[in-house]
Image (cartoon, rainbow, N blue to C red):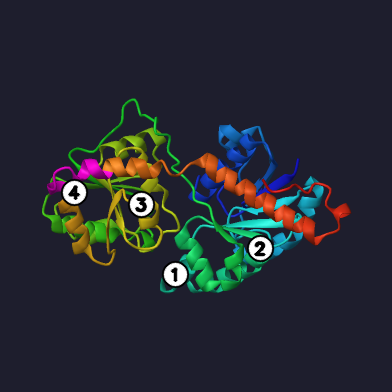
Amino acid sequence: MPRVLVNMPTQFGGRPSGVALVAFRVIAGLIERGTFTVVLRSPWTRAQLPEAIRDRIEVVTVPRPRIMLLDVLRQAVTVPRLCRAFNIDVVLNADPYGAAFGGRARVSVVHDLYFRTMPGRSRSREALTTDPIFRLVLANSARVIAVSEATRRDLGRFYPTLRDRTHTVPSAAMIDPDAVDPAPELPPGPFVLAVGNAMYNKNFATLARALAALGRPEIGIVHVGEDPDEAIAEALGGAPVRLTRLSRIGEGRLAALYRNALCLCVPSFAEGFCLPVLEAQALGCPVICSNRSATPEIAGAGALTFDPTDAGALTACLRRLLDEPGLRAALIDRGRDNAGLYDWAETARRYETLLLDALRDSARAEPAGKVPHAHPAP
């Protein structure tokens, strides 16, 4: 059985991020399919891993790097050595800040290209170092996985040599649709839900301005995530809009918020995928989202969309949701249908196919005697 090294050094151990949660779901799917033996290299210890994979994989715990470019260069030496020690056939980089060498082939996942699509908002050092990292790691990957068609198009635009090697493999909703909190603490009155840390690309200030202009003070905002700069409160400008801030809440409480929200609002300038859209749709929460980057693609027919630079357009969407008979129910129905198109088992199958394709290509490039574990693509 071929062995895959899932390489994920950039994530904080024990702190689930979108990248880590996707990687863990993919690992669980690969295990269930039974094609690969999995080794995980990351800052996560075995005890911190989800129960579904904790005792079913080999674990190599490494410290999270402080300087990504230096670590990528270091991985060019250390990961091939690790691959030889663990008899690794193929490396799966969970993001591009991984290994350019090691195993017989490499497959790398790209979640977004914010440093390219929003260049004015990237710190200068980040912008200068991220591009050479992408060029080194992705150029040495037999396959590149984009999490959405929007991300695949961005890759093709900025790195045209990758077009023939890039494949779209979407994720699916993370939250358990049956998750419950036995005593959920829900905010009083109706509310619009916003999920995610208040970074620039999330554009939550536009949500605040739109709700302030709506003129219905009974409707509040519930923000799940960090907002250290108080971007939402500042954009409200003293308007009588109730703001509830929550962070690091459990799955059951988050599910209750989705089920009870007037809607989920995603006013982002840019998203690589946007899992909250599918989570909301799976739990019967209407979605109002930006018409840019990946959000309209992921939301499908189950959302109202608007220009994220126009707070008035968002206000108009909120008014439609409140005032048009049957619209909310229709969005819920269409959203559930859309969320059903995304499936983790299918995601794992596509990852498996691309990993096996990469191994097949490496077998063609080397004498047969040097690739004893070569495995045909399904």
Question: What residue did someone put label 1 on?
Answer: 117
Question: What residue did someone put label 2 on?
Answer: 72
Left or right of 178? Residue 2 is right
Which one is earlier in the sequence, the residue at label 1 or at label 2?
Answer: 2
Which callout, 1 or 2, points to the residue nearer the camera? 1
Left or right of 123? Residue 188 is left
Which residue is at a point 34% across and 60% down the rendered structure image? 268
- Residue 243 in view, yes or no: no
Which residue is at a point 26% across and 35% down the rendered structure image? 186
User: Over which residues does the magenta segment extend?
Assistant: 322-331
Which callout, 3 or 1, points to the residue nearer the camera? 3
Question: What residue did someone put label 3 on?
Answer: 300
Which one is earlier in the sequence, the residue at label 3 or at label 2?
Answer: 2
Q: Amino acid at mark 2?
A: Val
Question: What residue did someone put label 4 on?
Answer: 321
Q: Amino acid at mark 3?
A: Gly
Q: Is residue 127 above or below residue 95?
A: below
Find residue 159 and report its image quarter.
bottom right
Q: Secondary structure at mark 1?
A: helix
Which residue is at a point 14% across and 55% down the rendered structure image? 214
Give the spatial CA distance, label 3 vs label 2: 36 Å
Verify CB contact (< 8 Å) between mark 1 and mark 2.
no
Main SS of residues in magenta: helix
Near-viewer residue (202 or 71): 202
Q: Is residue 210 magenta?
A: no
